[in-house]
Amino acid sequence: MQDAKSPNYELTLLFSMAFRTAIDELHAELEQRGFGDVRPSHGFVFQRLAAQGATGIELAQHMGITKQAASLTVDYLEQHGYVKREPHPTDRRGKLIVLTAHGWECIRETESIFTAIESRWRDLLGEETMEKMRLDLRRIIQSSKAANPYSFRPPVW
Amino acid sequence: MQDAKSPNYELTLLFSMAFRTAIDELHAELEQRGFGDVRPSHGFVFQRLAAQGATGIELAQHMGITKQAASLTVDYLEQHGYVKREPHPTDRRGKLIVLTAHGWECIRETESIFTAIESRWRDLLGEETMEKMRLDLRRIIQSSKAANPYSFRPPVW
DNA sequence: TAAATAAGTCAATTCGCTTGACTATAATGA
DNA sequence: TCATTATAGTCAAGCGAATTGACTTATTTA
């Protein structure tokens, strides 16, 4: 083993901690603003729905889970008023899942909270450092041997 | 919504992706080296056990789960030969969970794989950038409003 | 030394997800 | 054209990793 303060995998841990720090703060704030019933993955769903909605299968692919699991998530979000299922405009097998007004509110709050978080980081590190970190992180991710290098996949544990 | 290429939460996503990239590569490599039966969280267990072992409750606290859940994890790792339960030297209620030789091997392989990953990043970005990123990330994490700022907690999703 | 606390296990349950089977609709091709 | 194949979604059963609650045994405290 190496020095406990700086083992060779510290950077990897720091990535996870930084992510979790931001997500924890986001959801603590969301709860205070009346959105205590959304999980981190739901934000990822909303992001996909924002543009023009999505079918269940598109959502499942986006989330990296089965269509059945995605459907359960949609059930939950529908029951909590964040999304609704509409008949698909061109495919009568399918349904189009779209955000409700409440869903849009949640997105706007999320945007505002993330803006606050990143602007705090910006105050701390400076604009230049933030931008460089963004680029460096992209390079790290792209350098991975993994099949699909620059698509978001949820954290594993 | 903002520009899809650079929304204000991109950095947060990048943290998660970088973490996942490294963890995926670690476990792909571990599998090739005969450690296909360990999950990401197990590495976090090993890290805690390495110093001097731990009791079930200490492990549970480290992992952020209940002692019952931790006990199940220990069952699994014991059955797969990574750890063993010994009578606690001073407390006859407790047991001391310690790494076996196989567990130590897994730690050494993990160290070696992380060293390779981070050295690849170092080739990509340079030593100076890596060190700055490390420090900047620590500052970001420490700046968090969360209760326990600089302790690792597993990713949420 | 009785009462409160702590370590660990057993049992039942929950939660988020999976696989498998199915219906309804759509696309394909001899 | 219409039989075949593929696709969207749902229902049902089950699984894995966690939870809560109840309990035994040992330790600490008042």
Image (spheres, coloured by chain):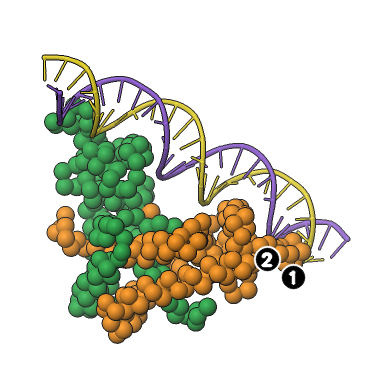
Chain colours: A green, B orange, C purple, D yellow
The residue at which mark 2 appears reads as: B96
Which one is nearer the viewer's eye here, A119 or A61? Answer: A61
Label 2 resides on the chain identified as B
* Residue sitting at x 16%, y 60%: B5
Q: In this rendering, is residue B81 above or below A105?
A: below
Q: Nearer the viewer, residue D16 or B110?
A: B110
Q: State the image coordinates of residue D27 (x, y, percent, origin top left).
A: 76, 66
List x then y, in percent, for residue C8. Answer: 68, 57
Residue sitting at 31 percent across and 79 percent down? B122
Q: Are marks 1 and 2 in contact (CB under 8 Å)?
A: yes
Between B131 and D27, the residue placed more toward the observer is B131
Query: Which residue occupies 50% across, 61% down?
Result: B34
Q: Quadrant of residue B157?
A: bottom left
Q: Earlier in the sequence, mark 1 or mark 2?
A: 1
Parent chain of label 1: B
**Which residue shows up at 31% across the image and 60% down it?**
A146
* Three-letter residue code for mark 1: Pro
Q: Secondary structure at mark 2?
A: strand
Residue A73 x/y as whole percent: 34, 41
Which amino acid lies under the numbered mark 2 shown in the image of this protein? Leu
Mark 1: give few (<14), some (14-19) or many (20+) Cα within 10 Å.
Answer: few
B123 versus B95 height, above or below? below
Helix, strand or loop status at disc 1:
loop
Return the x and y of residue A59 as percentages of the image width and height.
27, 43
Q: Is residue D28 left or right of residue B19?
A: right
Label 1 to label 2: alpha-carbon separation: 8 Å
For the question of whether residue A23 can be seen, the reply is yes
User: Depth check: A3 or D26 in front?
Assistant: A3
Q: Which mark is residue B131?
A: none
**Which residue was labeled with disc 1?**
B89
